[in-house]
Image (spheres, grey):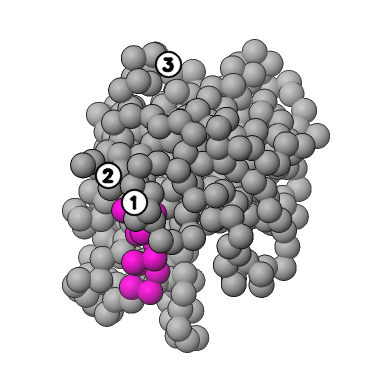
């Protein structure tokens, strides 16, 4: 009997790891701080067009139709994969941490970054990510360390983006994509490089998934209103219908939320029957009709995903499946926005 175990593990990962505190390790911390990434070296990229990596992968049925192109670039920021508390770690991941790198490559890069290979070349930098504990510091001292950890991580991402723009972009339009901690950093990257900046005209869209986004933080960049809107932001956080985490009730604004089945601000509820494909077991196939999508305030609700073996899912937080549940819909939407941009060019309006 084959259960979609890979999908189940994705869903359960957050509940297993969210309170996973680790002991401070001066040795590991020193290694992390001293290993400054030089992005001219492919070893510091989890995904790069000049090497074979999991972002090149596709489920069998999609691979048959896939045709590579190099007209568009995707800059993808992976989520937190620095989770292991089995041995003492510091606040930031070392880029020499093989276990964390493998976790990055065969969860986030495989299941999330691969969505975007339909657009063109995928770039995903490794960065000295903040440990999962940085999202829930227990006291003031931990808060200071967590802020420093996120800052170090962002400086790596900024360095990677600067290198990419100087050496790789060559005028291509860009998609910014991310999940979870990657989205924490993507929001800042969009603000510093794109919002009300000349580079905004090169932005096809930003898929900033898994985190709350305050629309008031941006002057020019707006939520995507239609499936073909350009220069805008798509975002969602997925939970079981009826569930609202306590921290969301404490948010001071209503986050951007895009329906990843309709892609329209006017169509906020879509039944699972219209979902043409989720990625479940072992990334081998596309499974239709798994999950619907219902905008609810600043989050996305779905009924419990429907597939053989779903009784093993006990969590109401579907954070780690934000991409998996809507894989084919995201992929199709990326293609639509790319085609729209390539036909219109930079002379579009996102008002």
Taking the spot 63% from the left edge, 54% from the top edge, the residue there is: 299
Q: Residue at x 35, y 20 (%)?
A: 61
Residue 136 higher or lower than 14, as above or below: below
Q: Which residue is mark 2?
A: 3
Labelled pair 2, 3 in contact (Cβ < 8 Å)? no
Q: Main secondary structure of the magenta part?
A: helix
- In percent of width and height, residue 211 lies at 56, 56
Q: Tell me the quarter of the picture where residue 115 sits.
A: top left
Q: Quadrant of residue 97?
A: bottom left
Q: Is residue 175 left or right of residue 191?
A: left
* Residue under pointer 3: 69
Q: Circle 3: is it few (<14), some (14-19), or many (20+) Cα within 10 Å?
A: few
Residue named by callout 1: 8
Query: What is the distance, in whole Å, between disc 1 and disc 2 at their CAs?
Result: 9 Å
| Magenta-highlighted residues | 9-20
Which residue appears at 25% of the width and 71% of the height? 85
Position of residue 234 measured from the top left corner of the image (x, y, whole percent)? 62, 41
């Amino acid at each position: 009997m084959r259960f979609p175990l890979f999908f189940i593990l994705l869903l359960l990962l957050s509940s297993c790891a969210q309170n996973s505190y680790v002991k401070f390790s001066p040795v590991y911390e020193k290694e992390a701080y001293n290993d400054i990434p030089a992005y001219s070296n492919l070893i510091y990229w989890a995904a790069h067009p000049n090497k074979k990596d999991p972002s090149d992968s596709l489920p069998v049925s999609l691979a048959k139709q896939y045709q590579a192109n190099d007209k568009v670039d995707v800059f993808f920021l992976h989520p937190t994969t620095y989770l292991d508390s089995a041995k003492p770690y510091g606040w930031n991941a070392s880029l020499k941490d093989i276990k964390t790198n493998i976790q990055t490559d065969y969860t986030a890069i495989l299941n999330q970054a691969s969505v975007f290979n339909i657009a063109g070349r995928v770039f995903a930098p490794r960065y000295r990510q903040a440990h999962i504990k940085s999202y829930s510091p227990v006291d003031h001292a931990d808060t200071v360390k967590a802020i420093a950890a996120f800052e170090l991580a962002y400086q790596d991402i900024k360095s990677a983006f600067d290198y990419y723009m100087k050496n790789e972009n060559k005028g291509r339009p860009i998609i910014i994509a991310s999940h979870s901690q990657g989205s924490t950093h993507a929001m800042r990257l969009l603000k510093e490089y794109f919002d009300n900046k000349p580079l905004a005209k090169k932005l096809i869209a930003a898929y900033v998934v898994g985190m709350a986004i305050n629309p008031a933080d941006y002057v020019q960049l707006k939520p995507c209103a239609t499936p073909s809107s350009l220069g805008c932001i798509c975002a969602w956080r997925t939970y079981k219908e009826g569930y609202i985490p306590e921290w969301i009730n404490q948010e001071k604004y209503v986050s951007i939320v895009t329906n990843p089945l309709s892609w329209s601000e006017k169509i906020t509820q879509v039944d699972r029957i219209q979902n043409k494909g989720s990625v479940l077991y072992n990334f081998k196939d596309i499974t239709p009709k798994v999950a619907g999508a219902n905008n609810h305030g600043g989050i996305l609700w779905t009924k419990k995903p429907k597939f053989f073996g779903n009784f093993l899912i006990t969590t109401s937080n579907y954070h780690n499946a934000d991409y998996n549940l809507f894989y084919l819909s995201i992929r199709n939407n990326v293609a639509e926005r790319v085609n729209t941009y390539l036909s219109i060019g930079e002379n579009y309006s996102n008002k």
